[in-house]
Amino acid sequence: MSPSSSTPRDATEAIDTPGASLADVGEFGLISRVTRDRSQPAATLLGPGDDAAVVAAPDGRVVACTDVLVDGVHFRLDWSTPEQVGRKAAAANLADVAAMGAVPTGLLVGLACPADTPLQTLEDLASGLWVEAGLVGVGVVGGDVAASATLVISVTALGSLEGRAPVLRSGARPGDTVAVCGRLGWSGAGLAVLTRGFRSPGAVVNAHRVPEPPYAAGPVAARAGATSMIDVSDGLLADLGHVARASGVLVDLWSATLEVPARLVDVGSALGVDPLHWLLTGGEDHALVATFPPGAPPPEGWTVIGAVSTGEPGVLVDGQTYEGDGGWEHFSR
Amino acid sequence: MSPSSSTPRDATEAIDTPGASLADVGEFGLISRVTRDRSQPAATLLGPGDDAAVVAAPDGRVVACTDVLVDGVHFRLDWSTPEQVGRKAAAANLADVAAMGAVPTGLLVGLACPADTPLQTLEDLASGLWVEAGLVGVGVVGGDVAASATLVISVTALGSLEGRAPVLRSGARPGDTVAVCGRLGWSGAGLAVLTRGFRSPGAVVNAHRVPEPPYAAGPVAARAGATSMIDVSDGLLADLGHVARASGVLVDLWSATLEVPARLVDVGSALGVDPLHWLLTGGEDHALVATFPPGAPPPEGWTVIGAVSTGEPGVLVDGQTYEGDGGWEHFSR
């Protein structure tokens, strides 16, 4: 940081008024507020407040990943509460840890936001991070906050492989089955609803606001011998495309196995959209999709939706190229 | 990420033109470009390209910290090259790892930037991260990129304590000596020069653009028995203030021991500033300041600059409250 003529404030000087903003309490005041009264789990050997945190890495390795969420791109504060945004930011990262077959051990957050951001917004955002972290028994172990014209949340998740090899995108082999665990298409349907100016049905809108990744299913799949795994953040076809190319295999999905929830059928009817499109291309539900070797039935809670074979790396649906949008990458024109 | 009507691009579709922007190559194209031809050190057990990286944590613990740098706040692209910005972003985090007495093991980067950011800018920024990471023998193991109106770089550094206890801010005890390793005031002087519209002398301007933290001195101090340590990111007085309050001690600095480099004397004369002010309050050089127990001489390269005693927690200079600016916190009014 750079020198200025301002006097530094301590957390103890923080101003406690309902309309207070980040500028009123400063960086240290905010950090003090969002970390106080938080109890850290055993894996947090040293929590926030020093130059760095220390987190347990029991098997001598640490899984680490970072995801960035930007206001207006990945979320809208007029569509979601700050707490929902915090939960979504944490979930995107925790799902990545699960997709390696690992269990999360901690979160760090890099937050950039306008100096006039209400303190309540930031406290709620932090609460959302803590709520989602709490679902997997970890804490927010550290972070930083800086002034920025745009609200940007960069979350880093750490995890433990519990002695196992990581489950990579590149391990799918011809003959493997493809299976999924978790919701598909709900967030995409919710986004379609919100985009058209509606706020209901709540089930799909809330699915877009806060995903429900099946975190525990990642390590379970790893123990069951999963040969490859990825979380569905960009859409089933897009993410299986990563697996297909990394593994050098062809993935064929069987559309009849993709059960379309009644709720999505209803929303599809109302909006004139084939709900299968959301299941195949909708991102952000963070379902886990994995491949399992021949003869190894997927664990309970997983549904077989296709098979791996030799061929030009890619993904087919019922043997055909899917004609709809294959997924989402937000810089492409 | 959210669905859109755009077609995803693969890295292989990346457009190779001199004027290409992030929007031309997409998220995956950029990641492919900035990770190709990079060799990872042994600590990187799994590098970029999967849902998460895997990094060695040999003693069963991982040190982790995050720092956020924002365009126009922590750097200006008309003052610094993108490579210098990348180096600075990495340095701020690597210095935090060193300040725990740890050695870095890897970096992750969360980048938010305008979609029309030139590809060359982003490649240079990534090169800067790699250059600085290379100074301590680590790699950029993962990250994410997203579209944002503001350029924000959130870096997470990981590190290893090599079996030692972390050196905290809270360990200073009355009777300890205070010692510093690394530059003080250079970045502050450089910022003063740049702020007044000058571009020289290069030595101080470049010190502001790219700090030179004494990374190796952190673990050396830990092995020498340092009781507390912090890196000087906000200014010597401000950062020692954190140590004083966390430890519940009074720190007295002896100004006669703070040797003012001839270069800073010259810049001070030219700008009409007492250069001692930069040494006491200038941030971003990321020197390391530590306390050592009585009878334990600080390691080679460290200079004793004061002592710890009992008293109201705070920092004095020659027994007096320093009347200048105590440091910098960028949200305070």
Image (cartoon, coloured by chain):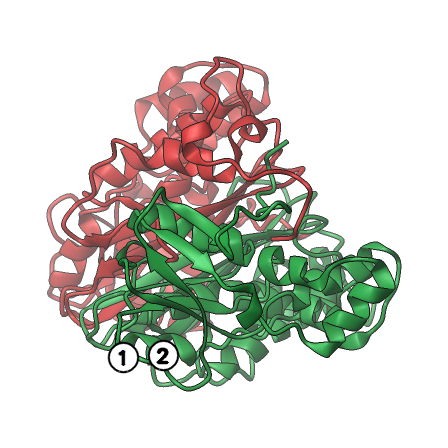
Chain colours: A red, B green
The residue carrying pointer 2 sits among few (fewer than 14), some (14 to 19) or many (20 or more) residues within 10 Å by Cα, namely: many
Disc 2 marks a residue whose amino acid type is: Pro
Disc 2 designates what residue?
A: B298
Quarter-of-image position of residue A5 = top right
Q: Hey, what amino acid is under mark 1?
A: Arg
Which circle, 2 or 1, is nearer the viewer? 2
**Left or right: residue B154 compared with residue A64:** right
Judge from the rendering whether residue A284 lies leftward or rightward of residue B117; answer left or right: left
Secondary structure beneath dot 1 equals: helix
Residue nearest the observer in this picture, B220 or B78: B220
Q: Tell which of B96 and A42 is nearer to you.
A: B96
Nearest to the observer: residue B67 or residue A104: B67
Labelled disc at residue B223: 1
Q: Quadrant of residue A97?
A: bottom left
- Give the chain letter at badge 2: B
In the image, taking residue B35 as reference, residue A88 lies left or right, namely: left
Question: Which label number is shown at residue B3?
Answer: none
Q: Is residue A318 visible?
A: no
The answer to whether A193 is drawn above or below residue B154 in the figure is above
Q: CA distance from mark 2 to mark 1?
A: 10 Å
